[in-house]
Structures are given as structure tokens and as C-alpha cells.
Image (cartoon, grey):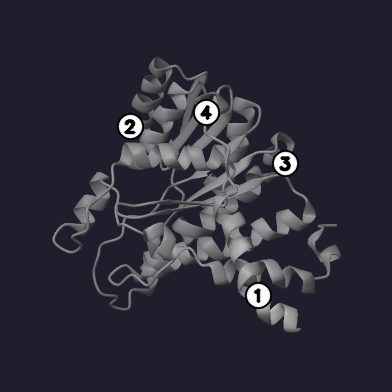
């Protein structure tokens, strides 16, 4: 006990240093060449930029969003940029049946999935919460539950390919954020669900990585419109943001932080939570982590 008291901070320091700085692998665009990648919410903004980056890296790209016209243009652009193949399926993630059927159609078209990038959201105005329970429910369904539906449907293919799930989230899913309570709640839910599933995969030795991407304000048209006159932080470029998300997924990182706000990555990471999660695993019956 005396040893633990004297050396506890040293042990924790070593643990944290390993956790934050042990990833020495460098990203190479060739990592995505020939990979089969799905991008949701891909008709504009970050999703569109991710599709273009992936195309230039020689990936097979499957995109989805509501606007068929926009998706048709993006697929055409992707083929010009060098995609191994490019396809789209239009539909809304308000419909959970569509979400599930979309993955099945993508499998039939591409023959499998290596990376699933979950990026779609419902547009959220920045205003005080006024008791609109319907919008809270809709936000949770689109921003959270549809992500669970899509990842669950894709998991058998991702297990076969030792693939990756990339979840696009927000600083609003790590810290209290006024005027966007419904959006923030859905992003906190993503962290809770996918971070828990990551631990289950770790213990059960499921070789599917989960990357949670925590973004600050990005200069997409929708974000700039929603925040205009309300939130005055500097916005980060969507093109660079899209590339950082892809890099994080390819390198199988647990979390990616991207924002113009200085020190956001350092301040939002929670070493106490990380240590507690690591230590708490010893108390579980590991047999319960295996699905029968």
C-alpha cells in the first residue's frame, strides 16, 4: 500500500503518456486504395469533402443522403477524381427501415464494407430549449439511433474485413453546450454507446475499430448559417476536417479532435475517465462479453 501511495502519480503519468503518445504510425493515402467505404450525409459539407478525398485515394465510395440530384453529381465527381468505383443510394435516415436496407444494398453493390463513416445529422437551430419534445425525439432518432442501426447492420461485413466504424461527433458531445440541447444530447449518446461497444469489442477480441471524431465549429454552409450572430468562434476548414476524419479511421484511433479552438483536444480528453474505464474492466465477468 505504501508503494502505491508513493508511486501512484508516476504510474498514472506513464499510463497517460503511453495512451496519448504511443500512436507513431503515419497516415498514407495508399491505406484507402481499393477499400470499400460508406459515407452518410454525403450530399454537402464534410460528407461531400470526405467522398472527394476518398475518391482521390482510389477507394470504392458509396454515398447516401436525401438529395438524389446532389449525390448523382458527387458520384460523377468521384469517378473523375479517381475512385475505384462510386455509387449512391438516396434516402432519409428518419426511416430506420431505409437505414437497414441501405447497408444490405451497399453490400450487394460493393461486395463488402471496409469502413463505415457515419456523418449525417438533422439541422438544429441555435435557440433556447422551449419544450419541443418532438424535436428531441427526432434528433435522437436521426443523430443517434440510426447510427446504431447502420453499424449493427454493417457489423458482419466489418468483422470479415477487420474494418472500421467512424462516428462523426462534436465538442457538444463532450461538454455542456447551450442553445443546442437536443443536438448535444444525441452527441453525448454517441459517445456513451460507441465507447462502450469499443470496450466490448476489445474484451471479445472483435477486430473492428471505432473512431469517435470530436469536431468544433466547421465552415460548412449549414453550420455557418445556424451559428451566424449567435456563436463567434473561428470556424475550421471542412476540407481539412474531412481529411482528419479519414486519417483517424484509417489509423484506427479511438478519438480524433479537430477544432480551431486552441487546447480543445487537451482540455476535452478525460484522463480520469480513461484510467477508470481501464481499471474497471477487471471487475467484469469476461464470459458475458461473448454473444452466444
Q: Say which mark, if any, is on residue 144.
A: none
Q: Is residue 43 visible?
A: no
Answer with mark 4 or mark 1, whichever residue precedes in sequence. 1
Q: On the picture, is 82 further left or further right than 218?
A: right
The C terminus, quarter of image: bottom right
Q: CA distance from mark 3 to mark 1?
A: 38 Å
The earlier-in-sequence mark between 2 and 4 is 4
Using a 10 Å C-alpha cutoff, classify the residue at mark 1 as few (fewer than 14 neighbours), some (14 to 19) or many (20 or more): few
Picture quarter containing residue 164? top right
The quarter holding residue 154 reads top right
Residue matched to label 4: 28
Residue under pointer 2: 70
Q: Tell which circle, 3 or 1, labels the residue nearer the N-terminal end.
A: 1
Q: Is residue 21 left or right of residue 124?
A: right
Q: Secondary structure at mark 2?
A: helix
> Does 31 sit above or below residue 38?
above
Expressed as whole percent of the image width and height from the top left, the position of residue 188 reads 47, 66
Residue 172 image position (x, y, % from top left): 38, 64
Amino acid at each position: 500500500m505504501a508503494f502505491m501511495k508513493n508511486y501512484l502519480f508516476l504510474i498514472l503519468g506513464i499510463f497517460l503518456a503511453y495512451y496519448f503518445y504511443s500512436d507513431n504510425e503515419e497516415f498514407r493515402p495508399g491505406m484507402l486504395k481499393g477499400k470499400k467505404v460508406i459515407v452518410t450525409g454525403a450530399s454537402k459539407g464534410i460528407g461531400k469533402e470526405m467522398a472527394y478525398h476518398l475518391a482521390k485515394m482510389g477507394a470504392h465510395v458509396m454515398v447516401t443522403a436525401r438529395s438524389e440530384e446532389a449525390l448523382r453529381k458527387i458520384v460523377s465527381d468521384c469517378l473523375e477524381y479517381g475512385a475505384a468505383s462510386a455509387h449512391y443510394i438516396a434516402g432519409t435516415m428518419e426511416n430506420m427501415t431505409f437505414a437497414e436496407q441501405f447497408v444490405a444494398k451497399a453490400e450487394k453493390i460493393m461486395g463488402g464494407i471496409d469502413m463505415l463513416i457515419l456523418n449525417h445529422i438533422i439541422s438544429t437551430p441555435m435557440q433556447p430549449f422551449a419544450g419541443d419534445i418532438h424535436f428531441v425525439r427526432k434528433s435522437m432518432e436521426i443523430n443517434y439511433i440510426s447510427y446504431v442501426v447502420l453499424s449493427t447492420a454493417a457489423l458482419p461485413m466489418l468483422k470479415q474485413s477487420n474494418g472500421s466504424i467512424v462516428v462523426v461527433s462534436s465538442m457538444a458531445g463532450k461538454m455542456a453546450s447551450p442553445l443546442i440541447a437536443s443536438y448535444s444530447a444525441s452527441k453525448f449518446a454517441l459517445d456513451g454507446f460507441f465507447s462502450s461497444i469499443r470496450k466490448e469489442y476489445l474484451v471479445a477480441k472483435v477486430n473492428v475499430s471505432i473512431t469517435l471524431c470530436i469536431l468544433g465549429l466547421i465552415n460548412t454552409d449549414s453550420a455557418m448559417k445556424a451559428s451566424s450572430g449567435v456563436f463567434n468562434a473561428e470556424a475550421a476548414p471542412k476540407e481539412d476536417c474531412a481529411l482528419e476524419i479519414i486519417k483517424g479511421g484509417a489509423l484506427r484511433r479511438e478519438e480524433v479532435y479537430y477544432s480551431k479552438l486552441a487546447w480543445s483536444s487537451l482540455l476535452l480528453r478525460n484522463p480520469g475517465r480513461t484510467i477508470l474505464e481501464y481499471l474497471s474492466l477487471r471487475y467484469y465477468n469476461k464470459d458475458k462479453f461473448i454473444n452466444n
